[in-house]
Image (cartoon, grey):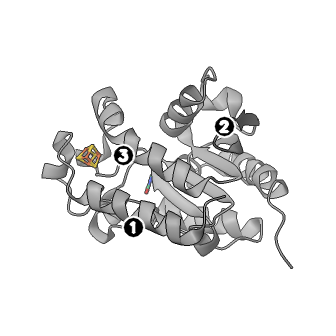
């Protein structure tokens, strides 16, 4: 594990690079980039898709309705948002919350890759299809649709770190869908089971 000051430097550098980034068109329409937030020694990293309206205004991930549900889900496994690290595939909001373009994902994900390597979480929860496909494929897995692979555990072990990827439904999809929320809550329990809390 890296020391926290080292991680702090890396995360600070990523933030600065994102603030200055012009690698795709989205910087032109964003209000604020949403780089990521959370504990630098987090055991859990959650990866969403892209900032929405409220995230763009505040510059913080998951502060709208989906974020409220995310807080509930974290509480259900006895975790606070401050204990996890949260980032997105895209750091700038796509106009009208449209889906990310492949070209945008390609341009932006080097930042996410660096965040993963800096934080080296024990568990990576990927929220929704875009985050799940990107992260699974990056680590050499075949990404099937989230309906098929949610809650499954994909082990990563390489020279740099060891972790588990657990794909999850996106909380925004579960806000108005009680059945999906039940499934998502169950999948969060799987995440919780891999991180033992200090007492
Ligand atoms: N949805 C996401 O995928 N990310 C956010 O930060 C907010 C909503
Ligand atoms: Fe750069 Fe990513 Fe923003 Fe595009 S979305 S401008 S790649 S930070």
| Residue at which label 2 appears | 159
Q: CA distance from mark 1 to mark 2?
A: 32 Å
Using the rendered image of the protein, determine whether residue 67 is visible from the camera's viewpoint.
yes
Which of these two is toward me, 79 or 135? 135
Q: Is mark 1 within 8 Å of ligand 1?
A: yes
Q: Kindly indicate whether the residue at mark 2 contacts the one at mark 1 (C-beta within 8 angstroms).
A: no
Q: Residue furthest bottom?
A: 199
The residue carrying pointer 2 sits among few (fewer than 14), some (14 to 19) or many (20 or more) residues within 10 Å by Cα, namely few
Marks 1/3: CA–CA distance = 13 Å
In space, the residues marked 3 and 2 are separated at their CA atoms by 27 Å
Residue 182 position in % (x across, y down): 74, 51
Quadrant that contains the N terminus: bottom right
Q: Give the residue pinned by disc 3.
A: 90
Instruction: Tell me which label, 1 or 2, sits earlier in the chain.
Output: 1
Residue under pointer 1:
60
Relative image position of residue 44 (x, y in whole percent): 66, 58
Looking at the rendered structure, the secondary structure element under dot 2 is loop
Is label 3's Cβ within 8 Å of ligand 2?
Answer: yes
| Picture quadrant where residue 175 is located | bottom right
Identify whether 89 is placed above or below 13. above
Q: Earlier in the sequence, mark 3 or mark 2?
A: 3
Q: Position of residue 13 (x, y in %)?
A: 35, 61
> Relative to residue 148, is residue 120 depicted above or below?
below
Which residue is at 28% across, 62% downward?
A: 16
Residue 107 locus on image (x, y percent): 30, 36
Ligand 1 quadrant in view? bottom left
Instruction: Indicate left or right for 112 with 34 as reference.
Output: right
């Amino acid at each position: 594990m890296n020391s926290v000051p080292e991680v702090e430097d890396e995360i600070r550098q990523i933030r600065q690079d994102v603030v200055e980034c012009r690698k795709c068109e989205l910087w032109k329409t964003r209000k604020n980039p949403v780089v990521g937030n959370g504990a630098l020694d987090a055991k859990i990293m959650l990866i969403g898709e892209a900032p929405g309206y409220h995230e763009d205004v505040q510059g913080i991930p998951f502060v709208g309705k989906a974020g409220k549900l995310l807080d509930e889900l974290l509480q259900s496994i006895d975790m606070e948002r401050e204990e996890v690290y949260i980032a997105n595939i895209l750091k700038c909001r796509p106009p009208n919350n449209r889906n990310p373009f492949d070209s945008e994902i390609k341009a932006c994900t080097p930042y996410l890759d660096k965040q993963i390597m800096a934080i080296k979480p024990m568990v990576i929860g990927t929220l929704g299809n875009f985050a799940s496909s990107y992260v699974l494929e990056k680590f050499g897995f075949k990404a099937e649709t989230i309906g098929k692979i949610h809650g499954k555990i994909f082990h990563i072990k390489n020279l740099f770190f060891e972790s588990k990827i657990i794909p999850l439904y996106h909380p925004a999809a579960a806000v108005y869908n009680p059945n999906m929320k039940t499934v998502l809550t169950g999948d969060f329990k799987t995440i919780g089971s891999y991180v033992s809390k200090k007492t």
